[in-house]
Amino acid sequence: MPIHGVLFDVDDTLFDYSTSEEVGLLAHLQAEGLLDRFPDHATAVGLWRKIMEAQYARFLDGELTFIGQQRERTRQFLSHFGQDTHAGLSDDEASVWFAGYEGHRNAAWAAFPDAEPVLRALAPDYRLGIVSNSSADHQRRKLDAVGLLSYFGDRLVCSDQLGAAKPAPSIFLAGCASIGLQPHEVAYVGDKYTLDAVGAHEAGLHAYWLDRANTGSVETVRNGIHVIHALDELPAALTVRNPPTPCRPWRLDHRTSS
């Protein structure tokens, strides 16, 4: 059965989230006079990401709102400086601090260089959409800021609106419905092996794992999941369509955008 549509993850697939996160955090800590409290930049970024993963998981589970997880991340991060008052920051105080980080991070927002050319190449022949574990408003602003929103229009399915997050089959199926196609007619492209590739595969879509860093070997990837290392490999890879077969998660990864 031919592929007629392609659904994409956003962060670290189309959009270089990790770089903007790192640049934004380090710039904000420098502005706040806190950067020299860490032995090196990697330690600061590692702590921020560890806290983000834990609090963002609470958002995906419905325990916190999108704004609430930002506030909790701020409180927990600042509490590592040994000042108990940070844990008691008001919502407004935590939001102000996070907004300072956002300003630096958003100034570094950028799409990957291969994203727009590939979307432009695919757009005439495929229906394009987004499936993301995030806030729809947040992802829409982000895609608009980096010049990619026009390729998707309103075809964004995000966990905050659906009430389910990847790797649940329902969010992938909702993505297929948003572009008016059946799962067997749709490819899904994302950078997380378990959340994106395995989740899409088990929902009946054609799964394409974008392994930009070449972190896994083809031998460890389950049958029926295609591996690409850059988006410009995708148009040719879409012509390779193995029939879906059952697969098990290879590794667990929860991290996504915030």
Image (spheres, helix red, strand yellow):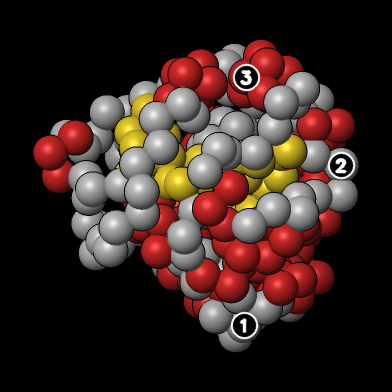
Residue 69 location (% of width, % of height): 62, 70
Residue 45 visible in the snapshot: no
Helix, strand or loop for disc 3: helix
Name the residue: 43% across, 46% down: 207
Residue at mark 2 = 153
Between discs 1 and 3, the one toward the N terminus: 1
- Work out how far the residue at label 1 is from the one at label 2, CA to CA, in angstroms: 26 Å
Compared with 236, 209 (above or below) is below
Numbered mark located on residue 118 in the image? 3
Compared with 248, 39 (above or below) is above
Query: From the viewer's perspective, is the residue at label 1 or at label 3 nearer?
Result: 3
Helix, strand or loop for disc 2: loop
Name the residue: 12% across, 38% down: 219
Residue at mark 1 = 62
User: Can you tell which quarter of the image residue 62 is in?
Assistant: bottom right
* Residue type, mark 2 in image: Gly
Q: Quadrant of the C terminus?
A: bottom right
Residue 212 location (% of width, % of height): 38, 28
Between discs 1 and 2, the one toward the N terminus: 1
* Residue type, mark 3 in image: Val
Name the residue: 31% across, 47% down: 224
Compared with 48, 125 (above or below) is above
Total tally of numbered discs in the picture: 3
Which residue of the protein is positioned furthest toward the front in this rendering?
A: 1
Compared with 145, 32 (above or below) is below
Query: From the viewer's perspective, is the residue at label 1 or at label 2 nearer?
Result: 2
* Residue type, mark 1 in image: Gly
